Image (tube, grey):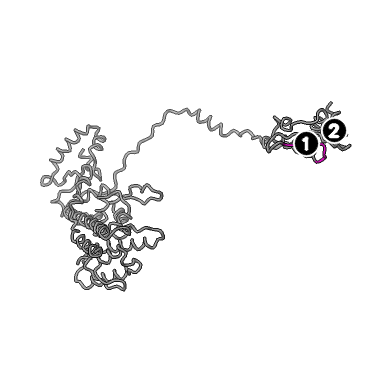
Amino acid sequence: MEALLVVASQPLSVDEIAVATNDEAERVETALGLLGERYREGRSGIVLEQVAGGYAFRAAREAAEACSQLFGRPVERGLSPAALETLAIVAYLGPCTRPEIARIRGVAADSAVAGLVERGLLTEAGREPDAGGAVRYRTTPLFERVFGLGNLSELPRLEELGADTEDIRVRLHAVAERRTA
Amino acid sequence: MLVHELELDLEAFEGPFDLLLTLVLKEEVSLGDVDVAGVVLAFVEDLAERDELDLEACGEFLVLVSSLLELKARALVAGEQVELDELDPEEAAEELARRLAEYRRFKEASHWLAERLAQEGDRYFRLGPAPLAPKLEPRLAAQEPGALAAALRALAVEPPPVSLAHMALRFPPVSVFLERFRSLLGRRRRFDFDQEVEGLTNAEQAVAFLALLELRKASEVTLSQAAPFAPIRVARAEQETPAARERRASSTLRSA
């Protein structure tokens, strides 16, 4: 199992490991738990993490400086605020189309989406059902891995994120009342 | 700076930005008169006077201006109903606030992602194309080489020539039916055309009808039909010409 996890370049699910090792999923999970104990922060240079719906090895945080001397982070480098807004919209609403993203952001989403697809953080996910339907996009497992998410449900609830629009709502309603009067 | 504080001084309007939007929605200011470019210029000039770029305000401004442009574009399309057109000011204000709230929530989500990215900055992992998965060889049932050879041999055989005989239209000569009808009239005064041609092919019936017309032209017969598509009654002409009588007689002799 360690060998599989070392060779893999993306997280492996319990089922995938079970098929490859010709073993039961329960035993695989138990073994993964033991591996997690052995390969954890402060105890090993490599850490077993549960991310993007599977398990994968990564470097320990204390080795980050050494890694940065030798390796770059091409995927995350240069993620602009526009790209992050686009990612947020697709992560919460996905699959969704570029017009839907543009409607929320108020600007065209073509450039941002194309860049994120090229980085492997977004991917196409079918089309809208109507004739000539727009292409839909969703986040990739790489997105979850880059942001350290076990899955998309680990994102904070959208309702809880600061929607401090009471001020503009109050002001707009006040204006509306004056016009109605 | 918040967007709604932006003061505008346009030809069609003077006042705060959010008031402009509400008035447009209420149709108290014509959408066609709103110089959106002027609104953008005012915003940009206001930004230039400040020391630092307020990205949040820029984002909000973009959402509101794009909503304005969307309304304007829809109003230009013939027959297109502006969705906010039928709303009263309270509902229009609520819709506008909803759109802005939605944008602000995703903006906060993007801030959360940025913070998360910063936290995960010291996490390094292997990135690369997935290793090649072994290709599954499709399993075929055992085949007989002889069967393949036989199939290929069949392909090499010349196909039989296709007969086009069925496409040739065969018309019997009109004279055949002329003789027949004259012979009939020699034995009886009248007959039904439909009964006489029953069972014949379409081509033969057409030729028989031509023969009938020839007889009529020669005044050898009279034709009658009780109603459209009713049976055609053929009768020997009352006033038969000598030539016609001779022809009928010779036809009767030949058929005897």
Q: How crowded is mark 1: few (under 14 residues within 10 Å), some or many (20 or more)?
A: few
Rendering coords of residue A121 (x, y %): 27, 51
Q: Quadrant of residue A33?
A: top left
The total number of labels drawn is: 2
Rendering coords of residue B109 (x, y %): 21, 54
Q: What stretch is highlighted in magenta?
A: B217-225
Cβ–Cβ under 8 Å for marks 1 and 2: no
Look at the numbered disc 2 and give the secondary structure of its residue. helix
* Amino acid found under the numbered disc labelled 1: Pro
Rendering coords of residue B52 (x, y %): 19, 69
Q: Residue furthest top?
A: B256
Pair 1/2: label in front:
2
Judging from the image, mark 1 belongs to the subunit labelled: B
**Residue bearing the label numbered 1:** B173
Judging from the image, mark 2 belongs to the subunit labelled: B
- Residue in front for this viewpoint, A147 or B155: A147
Q: In this view, does A102 lie to the left or right of B162?
A: left
- Residue in front for this viewpoint, A118 or A176: A176
Q: Which of marks 1 and 2 is nearer the N terminus?
A: 1
Q: Is residue B222 left or right of residue A87?
A: right
**Residue bearing the label numbered 2:** B248
* Amino acid found under the numbered disc labelled 2: Arg
Judge whether residue B223 is colored magenta. yes
Q: In which quarter of the image is residue B234?
A: top right
* Image point (79%, 39%), residue name: B216
Q: CA separation, marks 1 and 2?
A: 18 Å
Look at the numbered disc 1 and give the secondary structure of its residue. loop
Q: Residue A79: tell me if it is visible.
A: no
